[in-house]
Image (cartoon, helix red, strand yellow):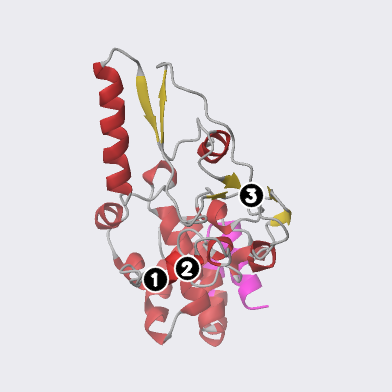
Amino acid sequence: RYHLLTAVLRELADHLDRFGYRAEIVFDDDRLIDRAVAARAGVGWSGKSTMLLVPRYGPWVLLGSVVTDAPLPRDDAMLRSCGTCDDCIPACPTAAIVTPGVIDARRCLAAIFQSRGDLPLEVRSAAGGRIYGCDDCLTSCPPGSRDLGSRSVEPDALTALDLLRMSDRDLAASVAHWYVPGRRMRFLRRNALVAIGNTGSDEAVPVVLGYLGHPDAMLRRHAAWSLGVLAPDLLGSIKDRLIATEPDDGVRRELEGACA
């Protein structure tokens, strides 16, 4: 779908260029709030989840834009709203929709997964088995549910355990269409370590143990938390030895906290 959207945007930009107009594709880019632009253009309306809702498809759309200096007719905004429906608000696992139409990005899992640094302790359990994104405000939204229900959904091919075992090169190729800060796979590994802690099995324990010796202190911190959930007795038995040789204060705090 991403490749198809990119191809359509490229064809449109090339068409404008042939007529002498400047055109630039803006897709998944912080320079333009595409949902706001689409709402003003009448593509859909802004829902209480802040997602753009489109007739029939609801929030299940991909947005991309072409910015141009070509003279185009002006469209009116769509005169629709969510009415009394607020199903998305209680569906959010971290209560990120603080009031209808207002979201606290500091709580939104989709935004947190794409951020740098450590995942906040208070959202790790709520993250569940997610690695990238959170669709709970979308799946709870009635518009488009009929269309969504008619489609077969294939399970994700890439599991958290697979991700943690892959090289950076292979992982980057597998998630070429994902936004990863600086294209640094350490942030996806961080997310996967938390997902493994929440949903992993005994098979995951040796992999998480291996990350306790990773050269990246951020990954050691999340591995400590993950193992504390997966195998607290095991972590308790080796905690003192790990702390004695651990140079990072944050990792030591995670080890202490995981066994508290």
Quadrant in which the C terminus appears:
bottom right
Residue furthest right as drawn: 99
Distance, label 2 to label 3, CA atoms, is 29 Å
Q: Out of 203 and 58, give the one closest to the viewer.
A: 58
**In which quadrant of the rendered view does residue 186 lie?**
bottom left
Q: CA distance from mark 3 to mark 1?
A: 31 Å
Q: Are marks 3 and 1 in contact (CB under 8 Å)?
A: no
- Which quadrant of the structure image shows residue 98? bottom right
* Residue corresponding to mark 2: 146
The chief SS type of the magenta part is: helix
Tell me if mark 1 has few (under 14), some (14-19) or many (20+) residues whose alpha carbon lies within 10 angstroms of its own: few
Report if residue 212 is visible in the image: no
Label 2 and label 1: CA atoms lie apart by 6 Å
First to last magenta residue range: 241-260
Q: Disc 2 on helix, strand or loop?
A: helix
Query: Residue visible at 27% across and 59% down?
Result: 167
Q: Which residue is mark 1?
A: 150
- State yes or no: residue 248 in magenta: yes
The answer to whether residue 69 is above or below residue 56 is above
Q: Amino acid at mark 1?
A: Ser
Say whether marks 2 and 1 touch (CB < 8 Å): yes
Label 3: which residue?
105
Residue located at (31% from left, 26% from top): 13
- Residue 122, percent across and down? 67, 64
Q: Residue furthest top?
A: 20
Q: Residues within 10 Å of mark 2 (few under 14, many from 20)?
A: few
Q: Which mark is residue 80?
A: none
Asked whether 57 or 113 is in front, the reply is: 57
